[in-house]
Image (spheres, grey):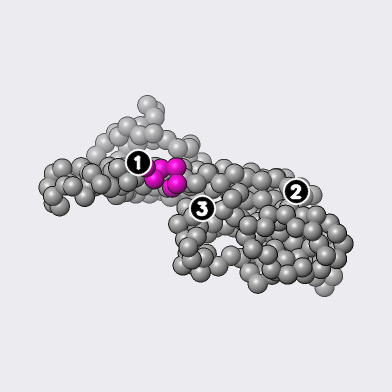
Protein backbone atom coordinates (compact mmCIF):
# COMPACT_ATOMS: atom_id res chain seq x y z
CA UNK A 1 0.00 0.00 0.00
CA UNK A 2 1.43 3.37 -1.04
CA UNK A 3 1.12 6.70 0.77
CA UNK A 4 -1.56 7.68 -1.75
CA UNK A 5 -3.66 4.68 -0.71
CA UNK A 6 -2.95 2.67 -3.84
CA UNK A 7 -1.74 -0.90 -4.17
CA UNK A 8 1.78 -1.46 -5.48
CA UNK A 9 2.29 -4.68 -7.46
CA UNK A 10 5.60 -6.03 -8.76
CA UNK A 11 6.03 -5.57 -12.55
CA UNK A 12 2.77 -3.58 -12.61
CA UNK A 13 3.31 -0.59 -10.35
CA UNK A 14 0.65 1.42 -8.56
CA UNK A 15 -2.96 0.27 -8.94
CA UNK A 16 -6.00 2.20 -7.76
CA UNK A 17 -8.07 0.02 -5.40
CA UNK A 18 -11.07 0.20 -3.09
CA UNK A 19 -9.98 -1.11 0.31
CA UNK A 20 -12.52 -3.25 2.17
CA UNK A 21 -10.52 -2.90 5.40
CA UNK A 22 -7.15 -1.72 6.64
CA UNK A 23 -4.34 -4.28 6.81
CA UNK A 24 -3.34 -5.28 10.37
CA UNK A 25 0.30 -5.73 9.36
CA UNK A 26 2.60 -5.62 6.34
CA UNK A 27 1.57 -8.40 3.93
CA UNK A 28 4.10 -11.06 2.97
CA UNK A 29 2.35 -11.91 -0.33
CA UNK A 30 -0.49 -10.61 -2.46
CA UNK A 31 -2.58 -12.56 -4.97
CA UNK A 32 -4.77 -10.85 -7.58
CA UNK A 33 -7.86 -12.82 -8.61
CA UNK A 34 -10.34 -12.16 -11.42
CA UNK A 35 -13.85 -13.59 -10.90
CA UNK A 36 -16.48 -14.60 -13.48
CA UNK A 37 -18.01 -11.13 -13.32
CA UNK A 38 -14.76 -9.56 -14.51
CA UNK A 39 -13.92 -8.06 -11.12
CA UNK A 40 -10.40 -8.08 -9.66
CA UNK A 41 -9.68 -8.83 -6.00
CA UNK A 42 -6.43 -8.62 -4.07
CA UNK A 43 -5.88 -11.26 -1.40
CA UNK A 44 -3.14 -10.69 1.21
CA UNK A 45 -1.25 -12.96 3.58
CA UNK A 46 -0.71 -11.10 6.87
CA UNK A 47 0.14 -11.93 10.47
CA UNK A 48 -2.61 -11.22 13.00
CA UNK A 49 -3.01 -11.59 16.75
CA UNK A 50 -6.66 -12.34 17.39
CA UNK A 51 -7.74 -11.16 20.81
CA UNK A 52 -10.70 -12.92 22.48
CA UNK A 53 -13.74 -10.76 23.06
CA UNK A 54 -14.65 -9.85 26.65
CA UNK A 55 -16.57 -12.68 28.28
CA UNK A 56 -20.35 -12.43 28.60
CA UNK A 57 -22.84 -14.40 30.67
CA UNK A 58 -25.32 -15.03 27.85
CA UNK A 59 -25.70 -17.95 25.48
CA UNK A 60 -28.16 -18.49 22.67
CA UNK A 61 -29.87 -21.21 20.65
CA UNK A 62 -30.66 -20.56 17.00
CA UNK A 63 -33.43 -22.00 14.84
CA UNK A 64 -32.72 -21.44 11.13
CA UNK A 65 -35.69 -21.22 8.82
CA UNK A 66 -37.19 -19.80 5.64
CA UNK A 67 -40.01 -17.57 6.92
CA UNK A 68 -37.51 -15.95 9.27
CA UNK A 69 -33.86 -16.57 8.51
CA UNK A 70 -33.06 -17.06 12.20
CA UNK A 71 -35.07 -17.11 15.41
CA UNK A 72 -33.07 -16.79 18.64
CA UNK A 73 -33.93 -18.31 22.00
CA UNK A 74 -34.38 -14.83 23.48
CA UNK A 75 -37.30 -14.29 21.09
CA UNK A 76 -35.44 -12.24 18.47
CA UNK A 77 -36.58 -12.92 14.91
CA UNK A 78 -34.32 -12.05 11.98
CA UNK A 79 -36.04 -11.42 8.66
CA UNK A 80 -34.96 -13.53 5.71
CA UNK A 81 -33.57 -11.13 3.05
CA UNK A 82 -34.38 -13.60 0.22
CA UNK A 83 -31.61 -12.14 -1.92
CA UNK A 84 -32.20 -14.43 -4.88
CA UNK A 85 -35.98 -14.03 -4.85
CA UNK A 86 -35.72 -10.24 -4.91
CA UNK A 87 -33.31 -10.33 -7.84
CA UNK A 88 -35.15 -12.95 -9.91
CA UNK A 89 -36.69 -10.46 -12.37
CA UNK A 90 -33.34 -8.89 -13.24
CA UNK A 91 -31.62 -12.27 -13.41
CA UNK A 92 -34.24 -13.58 -15.86
CA UNK A 93 -33.85 -10.46 -18.01
CA UNK A 94 -30.07 -10.79 -18.25
CA UNK A 95 -30.29 -14.56 -18.86
CA UNK A 96 -32.80 -14.07 -21.70
CA UNK A 97 -30.56 -11.43 -23.26
CA UNK A 98 -27.66 -13.90 -23.15
CA UNK A 99 -29.72 -16.67 -24.75
CA UNK A 100 -30.49 -14.44 -27.75
CA UNK A 101 -26.79 -13.85 -28.51
CA UNK A 102 -24.68 -16.06 -30.75
CA UNK A 103 -22.37 -18.08 -28.54
CA UNK A 104 -18.76 -16.99 -28.87
CA UNK A 105 -19.54 -13.56 -30.30
CA UNK A 106 -18.46 -10.29 -28.70
CA UNK A 107 -22.06 -9.47 -27.76
CA UNK A 108 -22.42 -12.92 -26.17
CA UNK A 109 -19.28 -12.30 -24.09
CA UNK A 110 -20.63 -8.95 -22.89
CA UNK A 111 -24.02 -10.48 -22.02
CA UNK A 112 -22.32 -13.34 -20.17
CA UNK A 113 -20.45 -10.85 -17.98
CA UNK A 114 -23.74 -9.05 -17.21
CA UNK A 115 -25.28 -12.35 -16.05
CA UNK A 116 -22.22 -13.09 -13.91
CA UNK A 117 -22.33 -9.61 -12.35
CA UNK A 118 -26.04 -9.96 -11.53
CA UNK A 119 -25.38 -13.26 -9.76
CA UNK A 120 -22.32 -11.76 -8.02
CA UNK A 121 -24.43 -8.94 -6.57
CA UNK A 122 -26.85 -11.50 -5.12
CA UNK A 123 -24.01 -13.52 -3.61
CA UNK A 124 -22.30 -10.41 -2.23
CA UNK A 125 -25.51 -9.22 -0.56
CA UNK A 126 -26.12 -12.62 1.00
CA UNK A 127 -22.53 -12.85 2.24
CA UNK A 128 -22.68 -9.38 3.79
CA UNK A 129 -25.94 -10.26 5.58
CA UNK A 130 -24.45 -13.48 6.94
CA UNK A 131 -21.29 -11.70 8.09
CA UNK A 132 -23.09 -8.90 9.92
CA UNK A 133 -25.51 -11.27 11.65
CA UNK A 134 -22.87 -13.84 12.66
CA UNK A 135 -20.60 -11.10 14.03
CA UNK A 136 -23.43 -9.65 16.12
CA UNK A 137 -24.40 -13.04 17.55
CA UNK A 138 -20.81 -14.01 18.39
CA UNK A 139 -20.09 -10.61 19.95
CA UNK A 140 -23.17 -10.71 22.19
CA UNK A 141 -23.03 -14.34 23.38
CA UNK A 142 -20.44 -16.49 25.10
CA UNK A 143 -21.87 -19.70 23.63
CA UNK A 144 -23.87 -20.29 20.44
CA UNK A 145 -25.83 -23.44 19.61
CA UNK A 146 -27.44 -24.32 16.29
CA UNK A 147 -29.18 -27.38 14.91
CA UNK A 148 -27.06 -29.54 12.58
CA UNK A 149 -29.36 -29.31 9.55
CA UNK A 150 -29.09 -31.71 6.61
CA UNK A 151 -28.92 -28.99 3.98
CA UNK A 152 -28.01 -31.44 1.21
CA UNK A 153 -31.17 -33.43 1.90
CA UNK A 154 -33.36 -30.33 2.01
CA UNK A 155 -31.78 -29.25 -1.27
CA UNK A 156 -33.48 -32.20 -2.96
CA UNK A 157 -36.98 -31.21 -1.86
CA UNK A 158 -39.48 -28.71 -3.31
CA UNK A 159 -37.95 -26.14 -0.93
CA UNK A 160 -34.56 -26.44 -2.64
CA UNK A 161 -34.55 -22.97 -4.21
CA UNK A 162 -35.43 -21.25 -0.93
CA UNK A 163 -32.93 -23.36 1.02
CA UNK A 164 -30.07 -22.47 -1.33
CA UNK A 165 -31.14 -18.82 -1.29
CA UNK A 166 -30.93 -18.74 2.53
CA UNK A 167 -27.36 -20.10 2.52
CA UNK A 168 -27.56 -21.78 5.94
CA UNK A 169 -24.30 -23.72 5.50
CA UNK A 170 -22.28 -20.58 4.79
CA UNK A 171 -23.81 -18.81 7.78
CA UNK A 172 -23.10 -21.71 10.16
CA UNK A 173 -19.52 -21.85 8.86
CA UNK A 174 -19.12 -18.13 9.65
CA UNK A 175 -20.43 -18.69 13.19
CA UNK A 176 -17.95 -21.53 13.64
CA UNK A 177 -14.79 -19.71 12.55
CA UNK A 178 -15.72 -16.44 14.27
CA UNK A 179 -16.34 -18.34 17.52
CA UNK A 180 -12.87 -19.90 17.25
CA UNK A 181 -11.31 -16.56 16.40
CA UNK A 182 -12.84 -14.65 19.32
CA UNK A 183 -12.79 -17.30 22.02
CA UNK A 184 -16.48 -18.23 21.99
CA UNK A 185 -18.13 -21.64 22.25
CA UNK A 186 -19.94 -22.95 19.19
CA UNK A 187 -21.78 -26.26 19.00
CA UNK A 188 -24.08 -28.05 16.58
CA UNK A 189 -26.75 -30.13 18.28
CA UNK A 190 -27.98 -33.48 16.96
CA UNK A 191 -29.98 -33.09 13.74
CA UNK A 192 -32.34 -35.85 14.94
CA UNK A 193 -33.33 -33.86 18.01
CA UNK A 194 -37.17 -33.49 17.89
CA UNK A 195 -36.80 -29.75 18.50
CA UNK A 196 -40.05 -28.74 16.79
CA UNK A 197 -42.05 -31.37 18.71
CA UNK A 198 -40.67 -30.84 22.23
CA UNK A 199 -42.09 -28.42 24.80
CA UNK A 200 -39.33 -26.18 26.15
CA UNK A 201 -41.18 -25.85 29.48
CA UNK A 202 -42.09 -29.42 30.52
CA UNK A 203 -40.11 -31.32 27.84
CA UNK A 204 -43.05 -33.44 26.71
CA UNK A 205 -42.63 -34.59 23.11
CA UNK A 206 -45.93 -33.50 21.60
CA UNK A 207 -45.58 -35.15 18.20
CA UNK A 208 -44.88 -33.95 14.64
CA UNK A 209 -46.61 -30.89 13.26
CA UNK A 210 -47.02 -29.71 9.64
CA UNK A 211 -45.01 -26.68 8.57
CA UNK A 212 -48.12 -24.47 8.36
CA UNK A 213 -48.63 -24.82 12.14
CA UNK A 214 -46.75 -21.82 13.55
CA UNK A 215 -48.17 -21.89 17.11
CA UNK A 216 -49.20 -24.87 19.22
CA UNK A 217 -50.29 -25.69 22.76
CA UNK A 218 -48.43 -28.33 24.76
CA UNK A 219 -50.60 -31.29 25.79
CA UNK A 220 -48.54 -31.73 28.95
CA UNK A 221 -48.54 -28.24 30.50
CA UNK A 222 -50.95 -26.22 28.31
CA UNK A 223 -48.22 -23.72 27.41
CA UNK A 224 -48.82 -21.98 24.09
CA UNK A 225 -45.68 -21.88 21.98
CA UNK A 226 -44.45 -19.93 19.01
CA UNK A 227 -43.05 -22.82 16.96
CA UNK A 228 -39.74 -21.19 16.03
CA UNK A 229 -38.99 -19.57 19.40
CA UNK A 230 -39.75 -22.85 21.18
CA UNK A 231 -37.46 -24.75 18.79
CA UNK A 232 -34.57 -22.35 19.45
CA UNK A 233 -35.04 -22.80 23.21
CA UNK A 234 -34.93 -26.59 22.84
CA UNK A 235 -31.73 -26.20 20.80
CA UNK A 236 -30.30 -23.99 23.57
CA UNK A 237 -31.07 -26.60 26.23
CA UNK A 238 -29.57 -29.37 24.10
CA UNK A 239 -26.42 -27.32 23.56
CA UNK A 240 -26.02 -26.58 27.26
CA UNK A 241 -26.17 -30.26 28.21
CA UNK A 242 -22.63 -31.24 27.01
CA UNK A 243 -21.20 -28.18 28.77
CA UNK A 244 -22.84 -29.19 32.06
CA UNK A 245 -21.56 -32.76 31.66
CA UNK A 246 -18.00 -31.50 31.14
CA UNK A 247 -18.25 -29.32 34.23
CA UNK A 248 -19.52 -32.30 36.29
CA UNK A 249 -16.60 -34.47 35.13
CA UNK A 250 -14.06 -31.80 36.07
Give the CA distance from mark 3 to mark 1: 19 Å
Q: Quadrant of the C terminus?
A: bottom right
Residue in the foreground of this view, choosing between 142 and 76? 76
Disc marking residue 166: 3
Disc marking residue 31: none
Give the CA distance from mark 1 to mark 2: 37 Å
In terms of image quadrants, where is residue 228? bottom right
- Mark 1, secondary structure of its residue: helix
Mark 1 Cα-neighbour bin, 10 Å: few <14, some 14–19, many ≥20: few
- Mark 3, secondary structure of its residue: helix
What are the residue bounds of the magenta stretch? 84-89
Residue in the foreground of this view, choosing between 151 and 101? 101
In terms of image quadrants, where is residue 38? top left
Disc marking residue 90: 1
Residue in the foreground of this view, choosing between 224 and 25? 224
**Image point 28% across, 47% down: which residue?**
95
Q: Quadrant of the N terminus?
A: top left
Tell which tag, 1 or 2, sits nearer the viewer: 1
- Relative vertical location of residue 129 with respect to residue 65 in this rendering, above or below: above
Give the CA distance from mark 3 to mark 2: 22 Å
Q: Is residue 144 left or right of residue 91?
A: right
Q: Position of residue 8 (x, y in %)?
A: 32, 37
**Image point 70% across, 45% down: which residue?**
76
Location of mark 2 (residue): 74
Q: Earlier in the sequence, mark 3 or mark 1?
A: 1
Mark 3 Cα-neighbour bin, 10 Å: few <14, some 14–19, many ≥20: many
Q: Position of residue 73 (x, y in %)?
A: 73, 52
Q: Position of residue 17 (x, y in %)?
A: 35, 34
Q: Is residue 209 left or right of residue 129?
A: right
Amino acid sequence: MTEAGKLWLPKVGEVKVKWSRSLPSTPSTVTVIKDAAGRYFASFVVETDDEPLPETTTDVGIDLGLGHFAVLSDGTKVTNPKSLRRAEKKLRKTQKALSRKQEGSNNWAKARVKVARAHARVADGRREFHHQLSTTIIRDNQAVYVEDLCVKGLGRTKLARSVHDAGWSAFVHMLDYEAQRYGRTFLKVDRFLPSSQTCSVCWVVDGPKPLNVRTWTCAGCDTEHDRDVNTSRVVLAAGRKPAREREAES
